[in-house]
Image (cartoon, rainbow, N blue to C red):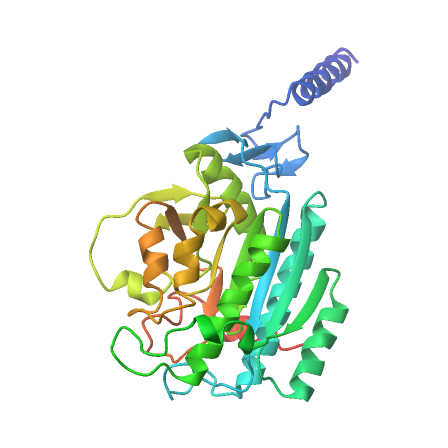
Amino acid sequence: MKEQKNNLNKNLLKNIFIKICRIFGYEIIDQSNLYVPTQEKSLDRNLSIQGKKSINLPLGEVSISRKVNSLTVIFRSCTSVNMLTQSKKRLFEKNKSEYTFRSLNSIIKSLNYSKENFPKISFDIVVIDHNSKSEDLQKIKNILKKSNINNSLINLNVNEFTANIKKINAKNETVTQNQISNMCNIHKSLMIAKNQSNDLVYFVEDDYIHLLGAFNEMILSYERISSQLNKELVLCPADYPYLYTKIEPSCIFLGSNRHWRKVEETLCTFFTSKKLIEKHWDKFVSMCQFEHYPFEQPLHEIYKTEYCLSPIPSLAIHCTNINSIFGLSPNMDWEKIWEENKDY
């Protein structure tokens, strides 16, 4: 009886201590069973609290000073063009529309997952389409209708921007019509980000297939690393193979469930803030007015003064040709990710 009473007293004191820790915002860990009683979670669960604190053991807690309030996803689609600058076949060798549908589906699934986890964040998705077939557009609309995310679809009017595009590029060649429409779509995306978004923006092409937790990781890691650096960031969702083709030093950051490394190049799919877009507006827009070589050169110039980070391992696969150095991320189960997003 005495031993039972002692155990009851110990449990009572333990419960009181846990409640006090919760009141003051402290976390405690029972290392005997890898359990966090203050959150009633095991250590293999996400312990961070969005907008308040980022927790990653054994480094402990980072207070969030850069809270994420909203995310606008701007999805650029065109099912009529297989490859923008080459004729090679993509991984799995399907029609271009199949990549568009699966890419959009993966984004919707990941956004819905984040919406459940982060109810205080406002999410919306804007699809800017150019020249897709009517039946493809209907499928895109059906995917959007099934989502729990605010959404809209815009048919791109290239005449809104073509007068501002120089017809001869940096290689002294005539800019192709496909590239002109691409530049118009990027310009429209930037305008929407500047005029309609409130906080974070994700610009994404229609051939990236995302993991379910992609937006969770990008949001939590953005908050953590931005709070540490006191700077806005650019995040690239893909771990491109070209990053492993040269030996050079890199800065490594710890995110929520990924390592993130500083990179100096991306394609035109990236995650950033409205503040940073406004800060470098002229450089962003210059990419839509003159075809540089490489095309993303203005982005690379921005990354000389801003932190651009890429995850290890990847959060998305870029479905281009299997031999492309800007394509498939290493050490990923590509077929599994592809199959998981076929239902739309």
| Left or right relative to 287: residue 27 | right
Location of residue 299 (image quadrant): bottom left
The single residue placed furthest to the left in the displayed view is 247
Q: Measured from the top left, where is residue 183 in percent x and y?
A: 45, 72
Q: Nearer the viewer, residue 329 or 137?
A: 137
Q: In percent of the image, x 44 and y 50: which residue is there?
A: 234
Q: In percent of the image, x 51 and y 72: which residue is there?
A: 161
Q: Quadrant of the C terminus?
A: bottom right
The single residue placed furthest to the front in the displayed view is 163
Q: Is residue 93 above or below residue 227?
A: below
Q: In percent of the image, x 54 and y 31: which residue is there?
A: 65
Q: Is residue 326 above or below residue 309?
A: below
| Left or right relative to 236: residue 78 | right
| Left or right relative to 157: residue 239 | left
Q: Measured from the top left, where is residue 272 in percent x and y?
A: 49, 51
- Can see residue 332? yes
Q: Measured from the top left, where is residue 186 in percent x and y?
A: 49, 67
Q: Quadrant of the N terminus?
A: top right
Q: Is residue 217 above or below residue 30?
A: below
- Can see residue 312? no
Q: Nearer the viewer, residue 146 or 60?
A: 146
